[in-house]
Amino acid sequence: MARGRLRIGDDWNAITIIALSQSNPLKAIAELVENSIDAKARAVTITRGRQGGGQYLSIRDDGSGVPRDRDGKPDFRYVATHICDSVKRRLKQGGATGIQGEFGIGLLSFWTVGEALAMTCAGTDLRSYQMVMRKGDPGYSVSPKRTLVADHGTEVHIAPLLEGMRGLTGEKIQWYLASELRDRIRETGVRITVIDRLARKQYQVEPRQYEGQLLHQLPAARTPLGELYAELYLNEQKETNRVALFRQGTRVAEDLTSLDDFARPPWTLRHLQGHIDAPFVSLTPGTRTGLIRDAAYAALSEGLEPLERRLVELIEEQRRAQEERASRDQLRVIQRAFREALLALPAEEYDWFDIRARTFRPAAGGPGEAASLETLELVDGALPGAPEPPRGEPAQREFFEHAGPLFSVVVSPASSIVRVGEERELRALPRDRARRRVERDLEFAWRVVEGMGELTGGKDQAAVFQAPLDPGVTRVEVQVRQGDTVATAEAVVTITEELQASFGQAMVPAQGLPGYSFERAAGESWRSRFDAARNLILVNNGHRDFVFASRSKALKLRYLVRLYAKELIMRNFAGMPAEQLLERMIELSLRTEEHL
């Protein structure tokens, strides 16, 4: 049996393949910056500018530079003739830490950025030397560089940049390095500055900050090859949430789910930001953005399993908490919208659930005169059974409860039906910007804008509309003035020959507006039910309409409002024909959705 050793038949062809294996120019720039960090640089400056007829990119650092040869000169010859034979790999084998490179091909990645690379470094004789390499050229040259004073550190100058690099901006470089080298920047304290002379801007590369709640006390992720480091943040579900994979502080994969074996919960749930650092994984030499599926890869997958189980539990807990919080917020919005709607509708037709309160206020002339009876606006947050202030004594207000200046006004009711020849009281409700009642220094002016009928008390807060003897529709306007501020509102009065036989004759206990809760009944036809004993509307969250409406918060809110309207109409207009129930449903939904 014949045996032998693999050899490269065409060295230059192999070098070309290696040089072009890095497809991402930003990754190539990051590798050059990492060379500076490995050289113990404390400051790195990346400059983009124009040179001759093209653009250039330079990376200058204050690190230790290229290793010297026996004569004290930068050993450029070794760098150029030992591709795939990295000094850093031997340093690592000797126990050195904090070094990232290991393949000896980082410089060749300039082929994806520009046409030529010039590397400048000083020797021990304080003279500067330069090595020049050109894309597609197997040769290189080293020569002294004329400078008055040799700079410490190293400068890599790439020019001219490729045609496809015209869109490369300093801002893009900054954002990429902030994510790509996040932990290396934080651990080494290196200061990276990007100067974009074309855009006339300068950027400081700051390690990317994650959003959300930092997760503490997560289970340790240990493997036979070493321990995994996890910095994870729990966030609201967003498609932009990503968990990256790092190796020794350098990003390997922007999104863990891009690796097929990790396209699983919790990473696919899009609730997490952060990164996992696996210092032992094996990278593909060319791009350094992929992993080799070896024993280290299997150890990474197995080591993450306990962490993944705990993360799924935390995400489920947050999901339940968010649903409860969203339900409370939606309930407040719905109840406020119904209060506003019922305020604008005739009280005798929609006087439900103890949401209208009456109290005595002292008359303007003082406590000795007769008290006036005034209908209050609906009080948000009032609970059934809450103690009421003693009659004849106004409830003491907190500072924030005092109304500000006039901002708007509404008419109650804003829509009503009156029999021909009869009367209807209309009341103006002035409000400040926070929707609190404004009561001082107000002037009122009522008038009929369109239609027939007469108004009495046209300069008071309440006016009485006298319906004409012929059916029709009348628009009434009120103008409220407070100093230089004027607010107006309208009401529509429908005059008819006959009224419905009964409005709201159902006996409804005074409980306050109902809440709602979910009951999953997938496959059943009912959408909601009213639980009178608990004053609760049960919503079938397994119904296809609920599933459809849950695609967005706004659609879900409108769906819940319509279920509310359906249950309130059915309960409070019991016994009315279906046609009249539908009319009431449209009326209440219209008034309610206006305030969502």
Image: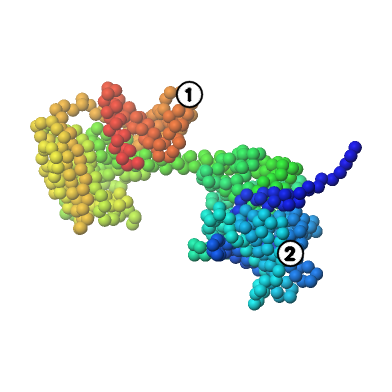
Residue 76, numbered label: 2
Residue 348 appears anywhere in the view = yes
Residue 523, numbered label: 1
Q: Is residue 358 above or below residue 148?
A: above
Q: Residues within 10 Å of mark 1 (few under 14, many from 20)?
A: few
* In-image side of 489 versus 340 (left or right): left
Q: Secondary structure at mark 1?
A: loop
Identified by mark 2, the residue type is: Phe
Q: Is residue 162 above or below residue 447?
A: below
User: What residue is at 78 percent from the left and 48 percent from the top?
Assistant: 8
User: Relative to the observer, which residue lies in front, 26 or 396?
Assistant: 26
**Which mark is nearer the camera, 1 or 2?**
2
Q: Give how far across and how far down residue 305 sits, in percent.
A: 67, 41
Q: Residue furthest right?
A: 1
User: What residue is at 74 percent from the left and 68 percent from the top?
Assistant: 74
Identified by mark 1, the residue type is: Gly
Q: Give how far across and how far down residue 580 sits, in percent.
A: 26, 25
Residue 383 appears anywhere in the view = no
Asked where in the image residue 594 lies, by quadrant, the reply is top left
User: Relative to the observer, which residue lies in front, 362 or 138?
Assistant: 138
For marks 1 and 2, give the CA distance: 75 Å
Q: Is residue 465 above or below residue 480?
A: above
* In-image side of 403 versus 228 (left or right): left
The image's colour scheme reads rainbow
Residue 481, numbered label: none
User: What residue is at 79 percent from the left and 57 percent from the top?
Assistant: 90
Q: Secondary structure at mark 2?
A: helix
Q: Residue furthest bottom?
A: 148
Q: Residues within 10 Å of mark 2 (few under 14, many from 20)?
A: many
Quadrant where the N terminus is found in the figure: top right
Please report whichever mark, 1 or 2, sits nearer to the chain's N-terminal start: 2
